[in-house]
Image (cartoon, rainbow, N blue to C red):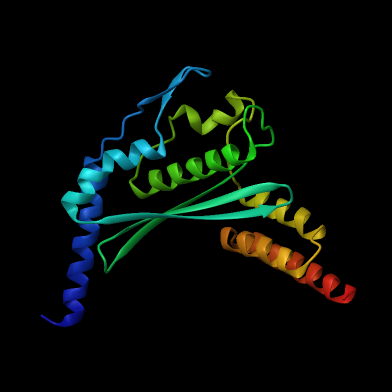
Amino acid sequence: MSSSNNVIDLEKAFHAKIREIQRDLNAPKSEWNSFAKYKYRTCEGILEAVKPLLLKCQLDIKIDDEITYIGNRHYVKSKATLTDGQFTFSATSSAREPEQKKGFDESQLTGATISYARKYALNGLFAIDDAKDADTNEYSQQKQSIPIKVSSYEILKNFTDGAMHANSYEELKMSFRYAFKNLSGEHQKKAKQVYDLRKSELEQKK
């Protein structure tokens, strides 16, 4: 057997393990929201449920978070990754802080946003269907007191608004990096146009 065929077989075995985990994972909605009267899953609950399956399949999981401040809001992009040490399989999700902060201080709000983004990254990683989960519309039920999943239009709009008020190139670059990573196609092109325009304006002010 050639080395290339061996690599292909190893990769197939890796993805077979992922399918096995997705098939066997039982992550029940174990938490109760007394305000909106529904059960829901949590990031912590999903991780606890998947640990025995990861051990059985000899896979590791890690979650990376990228936090960006655009305008006056925090945006979080979470990436959940499975690996056997050679191959990887990932899923990502983005969320932003809600406008209303009643009952939350800043650290709690950012923490809730991170947990929310992580949960939906894990949902994607393990093929958990969240279409019927009440917390997909949780922000409207709780008067926008929880994080909100972010659309491409909103990422572009908030980047554009923030870019026009950026006071330094570093501030502009940080906002652009997040927007560019999370956009594609025409939205990405428009973000680059806004970036180039504001960068030119900042350079002229020097």
Residue shown at 56% from the left, 50% from the top:
76
What is the residue that sits farthest to the right in this orientation? 205
Seen in the image, is 64 located left or right of residue 160? Answer: left
Q: Picture quarter containing residue 11?
A: bottom left
Q: Residue furthest bottom?
A: 2
Left or right, 13 with respect to 47, comes to: left
> Measured from the top left, where is residue 26 in percent x and y?
26, 35
- Position of the C terminus, as image quadrant, is bottom right
Residue at the extreme left:
1
Question: Which residue occupies 78% across, 66% down?
Answer: 168
Q: Position of residue 35 (x, y in %)?
A: 53, 18
Q: Is residue 22 visible?
A: yes
Quadrant housing the N terminus: bottom left
Q: Report x, y in % for residue 162.
A: 76, 55
The location of residue 72, given as percent across then percent down, is 73, 47
The count of marks equals 0
- Taking depth in this image into account, of 100 and 187 the one nearest to the observer is 100
Decide: is 4 above or below 94.
Answer: below
Can residue 186 be spotted in the picture?
Answer: no
145 in relation to 93, above or below: above
Residue pictured at 25% horizontal, 53% vertical: 18
Task: Give the side of residue 3 with respect to residue 178, left or right.
Answer: left
133 or 204: which is nearer to us?
204
Res. 129 image quadrant:
top left
Does residue 140 sit above or below 183 in this rendering?
above
What residue is drawn where x is 23% and y is 50%? 54
In front here: 161 or 111?
111
Q: Within the image, what quadrant is residue 163 found in?
A: bottom right
Residue 78, above or below 205: above
* 126 or 186, nearer to the observer: 126
